[in-house]
Amino acid sequence: MSAGTINRGEFAIVGVGEPDTQNRVPEKTELSMGTEALLKAADDAGIAIKDIDGWFVPGGPSPNQAGEYVGVFPSYADGGNVGAVSPIAMVGHAMAAINAGYCSVAAVLHTQLSRSGPRGGGGGDTSSTIGGQFIAPYGIEGEYSRHGMVANRYNQTYGTEMSGFAELAVSNRKWAQLHPRAAYTDPMTVEDVLNARILSWPITLPMVCPVLDNASAIIITSADRAKDMNKKPVSILGFTQEFEMSIDFKEDLLDWEMIRKSGEKLFPMAGVSHNDIDLVQTHDCFIPVPILEVEGLGFCEKGEGLAFVADGRTAPGGDFPMNTNGGGLSYSHSGSFGLASICDTVEQLRGESGPRQITDANIGLVTGSGGGFTTNTSIILTNQ
Amino acid sequence: MTSEYTNPVPTPTPDTQNFWDGLKEQTIQLKRCLENECGRFHHFPRSICPYCHSTNLEWTPVSGNGTLYAFSVNHRPPRGWTENEAPVIAIVELEEGIKLYTNLVNPPEDPTTIKIGVPVEPVFDKVTNEVTLLRYRLK
């Protein structure tokens, strides 16, 4: 088999399952009904649930919600919404993912209580969702309130202070000041960040990304085709996507397994070491996250992240350039994130970043954590 | 007062009904795996053990005692929140190893002085005739 092709007969469906009862089942939840189907399919195939490393969950609950419920933390997932035929499309997605080596045992699961619901989330009354039952009644709202708990636990555990987190926001602002399309470019000091309006103590407003209009696009093709394109290609050296419990139900609020797993796989896959990385784009949606990302990916030890980025190391002119467009905090964040970071990295690797250009930028890493912080996905790019 | 409660309240599902029914009786019941090699509690309640994937589970009463794992003071609680201006939101780690979101009902005047790791005990807060929330008190 040559890379990038899927030959007929190379894949097979090896198990099927449906719940005992369906159609009108108010005694079930979407996720309990889906679990029934999944267990039967796994039994039919003679596999254990833990063997599943590819997870395709179209419609109904997201792959993240379904994975967290069942306890499936795959290395590849897709909830791609391409309309009513999504479950069929997922068969193709699963083959592609297996062919690419991202996973080896794929489960496609669809479950939706369209008659007896809603219980899976979405619009309207959400009081029966997991969040509606176990989170909202306690006045926990928005990701910032979770990150208030993360930041406070971080400081009490490691003896650090919020000024360290605030400095990271200031460094990102300095990059944004060099970017013509950045949202926020006013001068900002550590004191400004610390003294700003408190959202969820100790998190203040400048430590939380805004939600803005933002669009980005990239074109990907094979290395062969890329040779004939306009510009020198930027190669993808590695890709990971890892899952675990959400921020609401993590084993360890300061050591996110999904980031650690990403790092453990990404560098060997890309054939580079941490010292080879010239720039890093993190997901600075909430100020503790980039710190947990640089620690989890292995750039420094747990608890050393703030010291690692201190003294302007990540700002323009620093020796560990990070979020070189200003990041989600100062450049742009639409609620989704990452594509603009990839665009920015590609421009850096092509030497097109003008006043923000890093000298000798050859290898860049883009990482992002999201989906209720059930997942981290990371890539390494190079101009070589 | 209970009829006036306007903050978000949970609507139980078949997966969680026993948990919420238990709180009304001032008991805390968690789902526990009955497989010998696993035996772990989990939370939120599911129809499958998220650790070993067994469906051999049992609702098991627990004391609810634990320690404060994390907390924050939420100055921007959900829209329509009327109970208090800035609730102390928290994660409590139970003796059984599971963690759950809650509120601290007796924070000191300056809640930022609270230290994580301190012992806490459950408070059964009957907010409506239908709903009792599981809140926590610093011991």
Image (cartoon, coloured by chain):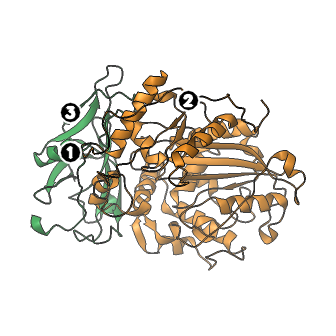
Chain colours: A orange, B green
Q: Residue at x 77, y 58 (%)?
A: A346
Name the residue tied to disc 2.
A13
CA gap, disc 2 and disc 1: 37 Å
Q: Nearer the viewer, residue A332 or A153?
A: A332
Q: Residue A294 placed where, x, y %?
A: 61, 49
Question: Viewer-nearest of labels 2 and 1?
Answer: 2
Contact between labelled residues 1 and 2, with CB atoms less than 8 Å apart? no
Q: Amino acid at mark 2?
A: Ile
Question: Viewer-nearest of labels 2 and 3?
Answer: 2
Figure quadrant of residue A30: top left
CA gap, disc 3 and disc 1: 14 Å
Name the residue tied to disc 1.
B17
- The chain ID associated with circle 2 is A
Contact between labelled residues 1 and 3, with CB atoms less than 8 Å apart? no
Number of callouts = 3
Q: Residue A249 placed where, x, y %?
A: 39, 45
For residue A316, the mark is none
For residue B60, the mark is 3
Q: Amino acid at mark 1?
A: Gln
| Side (left or right) of A10 relative to A153 | right
Q: Residues within 10 Å of mark 1 (few under 14, many from 20)?
A: few
Quarter of the image with the N terminus of chain A in it: top right
Residue A193 position (above or below residue A162): below
- The chain ID associated with circle 1 is B
Res. A318 in view: no
